[in-house]
Image (spheres, helix red, strand yellow):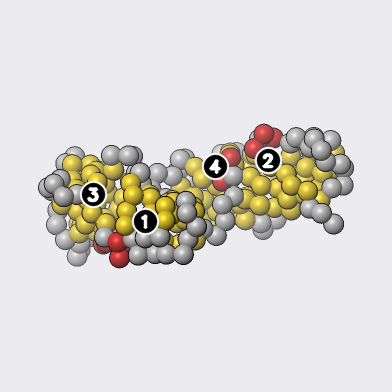
Amino acid sequence: ILVGTMIEDRKVSFIGHEFACVDEGFEPNEAVDVVLRPEDIYIMNKLEGAQFTGVVKSCTFKGVHNEIFVETENGFELMIQDYNFFQPGNTVGLIIKPADIHVMKKDCLSNRFEGEITAEGEVTFLDTIFDCDTTGFEVGDKVCVDVAFEKVDLLDHKEDSDLRGFVSFILYKGNHYHLTITTEGGAKLFVNTNDVWDKLDTVGVNINAEDIRLTKIEA
């Protein structure tokens, strides 16, 4: 699953390129997820006629097919399945056909929680007190808290944070990992990171004050 943008009907942008596709009904420039099956990415040694190129990082025989990891010229990593062997280090041509691109609406674009202003300069959400800018809010105000996926920091030592949890799901999106963190209270928190974590790793969670966005919930 890769991060993409629907340019218009039947045209989507991802991994730094625009591709024709068969999907319609999205808003122009809507953020989307793009699903590609490894066997639907066509790989060839010739570069002429390719939509884009990449360098073979590894090629491993898996009994029936080869599992090939390719790094594109824009730094995205793709996993490809093909019956042919491709030499690591070689530059290859790549093609993705419109019917093989599956575009999905994103479930959410950022973390969103209900919270409460509990003191000047403080908001409580996920059963944790966070520093933030509360200008324009009063103590007791109910608020909607938005935190971008990439603004959540994970800490190796959970004791360094008041909010703790574990890695419950890992999804690689071509140039970063999209993690689901389940907190000790059972809430879900989504994180975009370049760091490598293992499933079930325990973590501390840090969110800087400037990365917390508040909207008042009207009674």
Label 3 sits on residue: 51
Q: Quadrant of the N terminus?
A: bottom left
Q: CA distance from mark 2 to mark 3?
A: 40 Å
Q: Residue at x 68, y 40 (%)?
A: 212
Q: Are marks 4 and 1 in contact (CB under 8 Å)?
A: no
Task: Give the quadrant of the C terminus.
Answer: bottom right
Amino acid beneath label 3: Gln
- Residue contact between numbered discs 3 and 1, judged by CB atoms under 8 Å: no
Q: Earlier in the sequence, mark 2 or mark 4?
A: 4
SS of the residue under disc 3? loop
180 horizontally vs 122: left or right: left
Question: Does the image show residue 160?
Answer: no
- The amino acid at mark 1 is Lys
Distance of label 4 from label 1 (alpha carbons): 26 Å
The residue under label 4 is 150
Q: Residue at x 51, y 45 (%)?
A: 192
Q: Left of 204 or right of it: where is 33?
A: left
Q: Provide the residue designation for mark 1.
A: 11
Quadrant of the rendered image containing residue 176: top left
The answer to whether residue 149 is visible is yes
Residue under numbered circle 2: 212
Tell me where residue 112 appears, x and y as whole percent.
Answer: 66, 52
Mark 2 is surrounded, within 10 Å at the Cα level, by few (under 14), some (14 to 19) or many (20 or more) other residues, namely some
